[in-house]
Image (cartoon, rainbow, N blue to C red):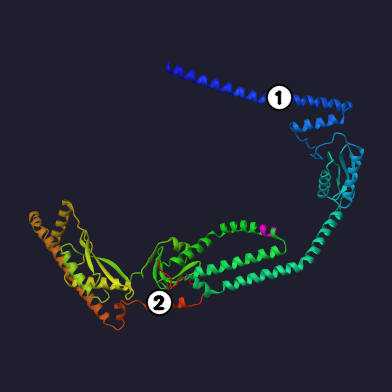
Amino acid sequence: MAAYLDRSIVRLCLKTWGQAWLLLIVVSWLPAHAAGEEVGSITTALGIETHEEVATEDSATSATEVAESSTPLPDPPVISGQSTNNAQIETTPSLQTDNDIRQRIKGIFSEIDGLQAVDVSVAQGVVTLTGETPNEKKAQQAINLTNRLTDVVTVDDRIDRTLDVQDNVTTVYQTLKAQVKNLVKALPLLLVGLIIFILVTWLGSWLSNRKKMWQRLTPNPFVAELLAQTVKVIFIVCGLILALSLIGAETILGTLLGGAGVIGIAVGFAVKDTIENYIASLMLSIRQPFRARDHIVINEQEGIVVRLTSRATILMTLDGNQLRIPNAEVFKGTILNYTKNPERRFTFELGVDANNDPLAAIKVGVDAINDLAFVLDNPKAMAVITNVGDSNIVLEFQIWVNQAETDFAKARSIAIRETKHALENAGFSLPEPIYRLRFNKKLEKAFENFQGSGNNGNTATSKTTTSKAVSPTIVATIDHDQDNAVSIDDKDKQQAKARAKQILQGHDAKEVLDARPNDKLMEKVEQEIAESSDETDLLDSASPQE
């Protein structure tokens, strides 16, 4: 029941809306229909009167008033080869009017080059153009001029375009000749405009070259250079505007600015990477994330900073090579600065035998490390147990040094050597990987029989006796081999220590044990910094550093 009531309500609403819409259409259509019938009757009456040629001045006036008050009729269609004048058509044309139109058009055409050969005939306000013109441009000019007369109903275009070479070339020649004459007349004015442009441009260049003034305005050299170039460009544009305004060519300026905008967008897309580097250079020069001579790492590229230019950051690698990194990569990349904090930690691992006490090994190793001159007392050197392996216990030693006074790689190398010797001298062994092999019982019996047959010269022995005598022999032989191997290993170690002691007592050995940094690399860096470069160094020690 509820569903039925809902459908009834919806149907009633739709019916009411449809009736209201129909009523609105009828109300809006009736006045227009009545007006249309009135206009149609008047038009019919006017047609009869015109056909019978009995129209009076009063009826013509009333017809004109009715036509003006009614809705205007659509424009007549344009016929191919003709041109239509949309002005109102007179009801009573006269021959005098047609003659006046013809005379007026002929007079106009006689004063224009290329239109003297055009013939004009007028009948009932319809102008027919015949004759010849050298090209389409002149023909269109004749039609447009004819259409501008008020009494012309329409124009019938029957002009023949001759496209004669001589006529067209002569016209172009006359045009160029006239332009050259105008240019000669305008030369003094152009010269004055050129002088004004040169003076304004020179003033802008003079101001932009006042580097000390711009450096006093801003401490950043890159920003100072940017301001100077901006002022120079502004003066050039102002000079161009003044020169063009003087010769009355403001429209050319608008064209130039529009073209410059389009060209600027195209060039911007073409040199996107260059612009990105330029903006990154500006940001880096303001932030100053590093200084010259800083030891840094940029995206896994390590070196010492030489200079920062408007396009790239120049480093001297640890191998002595010059490295250029685009500033866009530097600005977006990860920068690790070792010079910012001279205290630096290095680590290394050593493994001691699993039977040894690792804490005792740590004490021996740390004591040996603290005896080194380059190791800092604060933070203190330390060691921790990091892993228990299959055959050893891994210890990690952590040592701090001042990398401004110490070569990092040399210090680490010397610390590893001294720690290793200290542990070995204290009786701690640094074992190699040990593997345990297990055999099945049949293979063990085969080895026992093989060993027993080798020890007994007589083959006529009982199996029981051989079996009982073999096992102790194998164990004793293995133990004896192990003892021999240990004694040989100790002997090799003693020989190696003696050889190393003899070598390190030489005069040249001091350089191997010296942990001071090598000055050769810094000399090359200083030489690179001192060399004159066309590119301005954007790194300034007076600027605040990030």
User: Disc 2 marks which residue?
Assistant: 522
Tell me which corner region of the image, top left, top right, bottom left or bottom right, holds residue 243.
bottom right
Residue 145 drawn at (x, y percent):
83, 47
User: Disc 1 marks which residue?
Assistant: 33
Q: Is residue 189 left or right of residue 382?
A: right
Work out whether mark 1 precedes mark 2 in sequence or the reverse, and give the earlier one. 1
Q: Nearer the viewer, residue 332 or 438?
A: 332
**Disc 2 residue type (three-letter):** Met
On screen, residue 23 above or below 69: above
On screen, residue 64 above or below 212: above
SS at badge 1: helix
Q: Is residue 379 left or right of residue 313?
A: left
The CA distance from mark 1 to mark 2 is 102 Å
Q: Is residue 435 left or right of residue 108?
A: left
Q: Is residue 181 left or right of residue 519?
A: right
On screen, residue 162 above or below 56: below
**Boundaries of the magenta span:** 251-255
Residue in the image at 72% along x and 69% along y: 192
Does the magenta-highlighted stretch encompass residue 263? no
Q: Nearer the viewer, residue 155 or 318?
A: 155
**Disc 1 residue type (three-letter):** His
**Quarter holding the C terminus?**
bottom left
Residue 489 shows in the view? no
Q: Nearer the viewer, mark 1 or mark 2?
A: 1
